[in-house]
Image (cartoon, coloured by chain):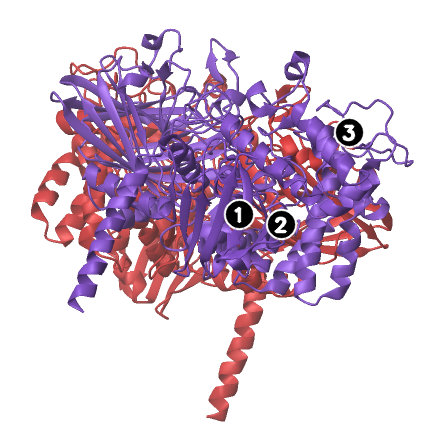
Chain colours: A red, B purple
Amino acid sequence: MKFLFSLALSFLCFHSFAQQNLIKYVNPFIGTAKMGHTYPGATVPFGAVQLSPDTDTIPYEINGKYNGDVYKYCSGYKYEDKTIVGFSHTHFNGTGHSDLGDFLIMPTQGKLQLNPGIASDPSSGFRSSYSHQNETAEPAYYKVKLDEHNITAELTASTRVGMHQYTFPKSDQSHIILDLMSGIYNYDDKTVWTFVRVVNDTLVTGYRQTNGWARTRTVYFAMSFSKPFKEYGHKNFDNKQVYRGFWRKFDQTKNFPEIAGKKIRIYFDFNTDESEKIKVKFAISSVSQQNALENMQAEMSTWDFEKVKSEAQKLWNTELSKIKIDATDEIKTNFYTSMYHTFINPTVYIDVNGEYKGLDQNTHRAKGFVNYTTFSLWDTYRALHPLFNIVQPSRNNDMVHSMMAHYKQSTLKMLPIWSHYSNDNWCMSGYHSVSVIADAIMKGVYTGNENEALDACVETAKHRSYEGIGEYMDKGYIPAERSGISVSNTLEYAYDDWCIAQIAKKLNRLDVYTEFSKRSEYWKNNYNKQTGFMQPRLADGTFTKEFDPLQTHNQGFIEGNSWNYSFFVPHQPSALINTMGGKKEFTKRLDTLFQMHLPDEFFAHTEDISREGIIGGYVHGNEPAHHVAYLYNYADQAKKTQAQVRRIMNMQYKPSADGLGGNDDCGQMSAWYIFSALGFYPVAPGNNEYAIGSPIVNDANITLENGKVFKIKVIDQSDKNIYVKRVELNGKVLDNYFLNYEDIIKGGELKFYMSSK
Amino acid sequence: MKFLFSLALSFLCFHSFAQQNLIKYVNPFIGTAKMGHTYPGATVPFGAVQLSPDTDTIPYEINGKYNGDVYKYCSGYKYEDKTIVGFSHTHFNGTGHSDLGDFLIMPTQGKLQLNPGIASDPSSGFRSSYSHQNETAEPAYYKVKLDEHNITAELTASTRVGMHQYTFPKSDQSHIILDLMSGIYNYDDKTVWTFVRVVNDTLVTGYRQTNGWARTRTVYFAMSFSKPFKEYGHKNFDNKQVYRGFWRKFDQTKNFPEIAGKKIRIYFDFNTDESEKIKVKFAISSVSQQNALENMQAEMSTWDFEKVKSEAQKLWNTELSKIKIDATDEIKTNFYTSMYHTFINPTVYIDVNGEYKGLDQNTHRAKGFVNYTTFSLWDTYRALHPLFNIVQPSRNNDMVHSMMAHYKQSTLKMLPIWSHYSNDNWCMSGYHSVSVIADAIMKGVYTGNENEALDACVETAKHRSYEGIGEYMDKGYIPAERSGISVSNTLEYAYDDWCIAQIAKKLNRLDVYTEFSKRSEYWKNNYNKQTGFMQPRLADGTFTKEFDPLQTHNQGFIEGNSWNYSFFVPHQPSALINTMGGKKEFTKRLDTLFQMHLPDEFFAHTEDISREGIIGGYVHGNEPAHHVAYLYNYADQAKKTQAQVRRIMNMQYKPSADGLGGNDDCGQMSAWYIFSALGFYPVAPGNNEYAIGSPIVNDANITLENGKVFKIKVIDQSDKNIYVKRVELNGKVLDNYFLNYEDIIKGGELKFYMSSK
């Protein structure tokens, strides 16, 4: 007994040590340059707070003009920038559209300035220059020296609370600015209202309400200082706020504790000694100021920054340790940074007391699940949620519960399309909640009422007034007149409908199965046998005349062209192969895609894709083709899959700030990497099959929630040995290049034998 | 036993019959013309919903220009107007500043128009002409024929729910418009945000958030139709709401159930048969859409309009029956309409489940009291709350509890000044919560912690940064440089401080008593012995040189001049008399006030006062002199009090739309009338004494909450017998012209013997 105990103890010690080792392979700067749109700041896994530096939250108004590029600043931070505006508390990971950036805080020193100023002259405002030499980013920890102010800023977080630690110089003019105007994608009228109460000299509460990508979004906060401020004040930059009436009885600009308006910046003044640290806790809630305060009190009772940081990093280590790999340091960095990026979105959207704001803008109490938000489903149904079904099944179950709650609160009676913060922004095509739900049901992950979930899928898929669904149901395709992305929608609806059919089959709902199986083949209606491409069709049944399969604009596709989208039949690859003329012809088509040379002109006219995100004509920087390299398997050309996925891994993922070939898209790019690095990929979520690729790790242990371990061993792994000679599952040779969910989830060993040919 | 029972029964029948008789003496149109600022619509006593027609809610934008007079439309309705824009759910009674007018509903017919149009051409929009011949107003009931649309509209209400009944002609183009842009004092940027969910074809919920007189005000609603609408849609008039993004996937203008924006008007379409009635229930809440719906379900389960109306009118009869008078029909109309107007504000501000939104914008649950809002305290501390201490002590107790809740939620740690809907607008001078609290404590009405209440009063009265309190405490007056209303403030603070001293004396808090007794004499510091007037003083101690005691502008006073305000020492009339040179000199001064002739020029330059509101130089239309006619009593000239109060009653209160000489001011004007009509008046709330005047009723029975009855008998009452020869209390002659609260509250009989000299 005693022996066993100390064995267990030493195992724990080893385990804990191993966890600490994984943190160091995460480089949060990866993807912060160019188009990755990741952020380097502090967050815990799936944390509601993402406390991160904003180098600009364009457009800022300068002399009445807006300046800058909104798209660039989706995550608030660009590695290329030379100045930091401040640290705000909410950020998307890797999106291609933007919102959030709530509650920007900036510590300054010297003369008080309440304007951010411009990047080319940081002394013109409260912003500061900084250098990457003086900047550190780890999971749940960020540190930077603000040169103009001679202040070191450190950030960490718990789930719902951010902690700032500012090391000031000696000064009787030290300030902490709370900017309620600032925000990401911050056009003039975005901030609808802000409200602040200075409760006492260390506590401030309030809220910020915006009309942006989320139409009606409110975030409440509670802000606590480790040291009382000596004075405070604010400026209301809204000249149109005409009625102020008897409020003039007070000097409201200074030490006046009831603050409200559309364009408010508040400052808090301190005297500081040399190297004095002032800390700020900042908690958020979707429900109320009280809940924000309760979140703070429940989650962060200490003022010990190191303790908060260490607890937050422990959480990361626990998550990262779910997959332990052996590989080169470079691959480990790519892999664990990918792991890190997959465990950021969706985010927890519920207070410690169980309350959250629903889509109906009412306060709800979640019964038996944790509510999540930020569902970038067009991206994440592909590999992120399938990955969760292996390493985060409890959370994925909660996510499906959250989608079902959304559905129940929807007056449209629809599942989420692209939802965040009690809103749906309807971004992109398809209705891919149904894929996530089907995959969770097929894999036994969803604990809710499956028939109710199927009903929600069916109701969503039959919402005739939504983006051509009516015409799709009537004609089997969406007329080009009806929608600018008619082909994307038809193809994606067909896949989603197949997902619905799979649930129906499992639940013995044969009428639904029959109806949606039929719909799952509607992709055929956009296939032009003449050209061999998926093409938009007019209401009269003819294909549109002006057609360019390379063009991404006005050709019926969203974030893609026909060359990529024509392969989008993940659920029926054999039928697609037949339609395209058989395996040989199909293989040739795939080869052409990966080998073609695109003219420079293509990039000039194409949104959201840079040359870095493209291999031949294959676009990895956007999602529609993420399964395409694996399609060779279905044409009996597994070697070509193996070659291409290795190529994509090496070209599209690099351990540097500019290392991502496109937006990380809430972890989808990263999830693709994790699967591919381990050697398999879910081509059609909703079935339980994975296509085998070419692992890049030497070996890996996946520790499952059920306590079992799935081991991956790669024999003769090397840069040149990219081909899979043989695969053994639990010692038995696999007779094709496919693996099943059941094989993984019951634990076991997958052995790859690699060769150079 | 049997005999007694039937006696009781016949008493009840009589009682019930008597109640029905009182309704008919209420004419809600009184005060709707000129400057009364009352509204004719439907509300129950102290009801949260005031459902009333708006004839205009200027400014409406017409071709980019705002048109009209904001002040005129404080209550939304002007008797002089020829068109009605619609029916909205919240209105102040008789204020001189404005807000509210939430959720305007208009039934129309024919071509849909979503603009209100202009009064000179009602067919230019959804508004309609109407005539007073086709208009009826009773307590809790309003009816009008909308000529343009050939629709009869009827309104009634419960506490938190309004009911509309629209009788349509036969039409396949009948509409009900819900205008979320409309509001009173509706300048361009007032509507901060509105949000609406069309839950199903008979239920709509949402909210409206405004930045007006109340800075941060949100009202939630639930709206239910008696008949399903066939279609619906909306228009968003906000061109600046730039981001709409993927919302374009839907045709949002039609049958799209998730609506939000700053400038929204929604329509619901019906087919109607000839004389078909469509009813709408409309519930409000300060907390949430759910609470609004719960309020509706709890309060108004029926669709029977007559039943709702009859229950509402029963509530009014119960309240009106608290004072039964014998008098001429004209006096009864003045009296019961005054009773009606005193029982409108403050209004219930709590949901049926006990939740309400506090000053801190948090949701609170009231423990042991009903929360009220709309405290027009500068007006209502004078006679309205003192009247409540006699006929509404339970409600007044709740109101003091509400003020204490406000104080506890205030980051400024101040009691309300002029508060409504979870905001303080700080209107007018003084801090008269303390008067209401003192009066309730001195009269034994307040059931809360009296020491805590005293602490709240003291903290409010020592808030140095508020409107000169610091200087007032240091110098004994407020320097004219500091405040434009320095004299009003000093005089009113001195009275309020005396109130605080009275509480302190009762609670044996001698330090507080001493401090505030001293402050209660600070009025003396603004008295200029040279001129015999209260005058502004500069920081150096000298009086300002340019001084005109008639002038109401820039002379240190608010809504008054020195002629009126110089008598504002209600708490120390003897000291004032001495200061002014003794009783004889004082009487002469009062005589001059009531007899002087004001030049026309005076009215041209004076805000908020019309010739109708003035007797000599005595201004009854504003409040500061409301006690002045009763001051003769203290100079042993009770006959002159008697003569003047009869004169005021006859000149300032008439049973017609233009019958009020000034703003009703949330019932203060009306409360003055009720006291005066009964023959006594509370000169200095905070003590329990009333000055005797000259009753205008023949007799009156006041039924108290403790079950006792206080009877007033007036012997030899007539138009000419305006003088009080003798007063007997319970058969014993009163030896002076003063009466005590205790005498009233234990029941008894007050007998006036009148004569013509």
Q: Nearer the viewer, residue B662 or A1?
A: B662
Q: Are marks 1 and 3 on the same chain?
A: no
Q: Picture coordinates of residue B334 (x, y %)? A: 42, 33
Q: Amino acid at mark 1?
A: His
Q: Amino acid at mark 2?
A: Ser
Chain letter belonging to callout 2: B
Mark closest to the chain's N terminus, 1 or 2:
1
Q: Residues within 10 Å of mark 2 (few under 14, many from 20)?
A: many
Q: Secondary structure at mark 2?
A: helix
Q: Picture coordinates of residue A235 (x, y %)? A: 69, 34
Q: Is residue B299 visible?
A: yes
Q: Residues within 10 Å of mark 1 (few under 14, many from 20)?
A: many
Query: Dot 2 corresponds to which residue?
Result: B435
Q: Residues within 10 Å of mark 3 (few under 14, many from 20)?
A: some
Query: Dot 3 corresponds to which residue?
Result: A124
Label 1, label 3: how many angstroms apart (C-alpha)? 56 Å
Q: Picture coordinates of residue A122 (x, y %)? A: 76, 32
Residue B632, quarter of the rendered image: top right
Q: Say if mark 3 contacts mark 2, CB within 8 Å.
A: no
Residue B198, placed above or below residue A242: below
Label 1, label 2: how many angstroms apart (C-alpha)? 9 Å
Which callout, 1 or 3, points to the residue nearer the camera? Answer: 1
Query: Dot 1 corresponds to which residue?
Result: B385
Q: Say if mark 1 contacts mark 2, CB within 8 Å.
A: yes
Residue B262, quarter of the rendered image: top left
Q: Are marks 1 and 2 on the same chain?
A: yes
Q: Secondary structure at mark 1?
A: helix
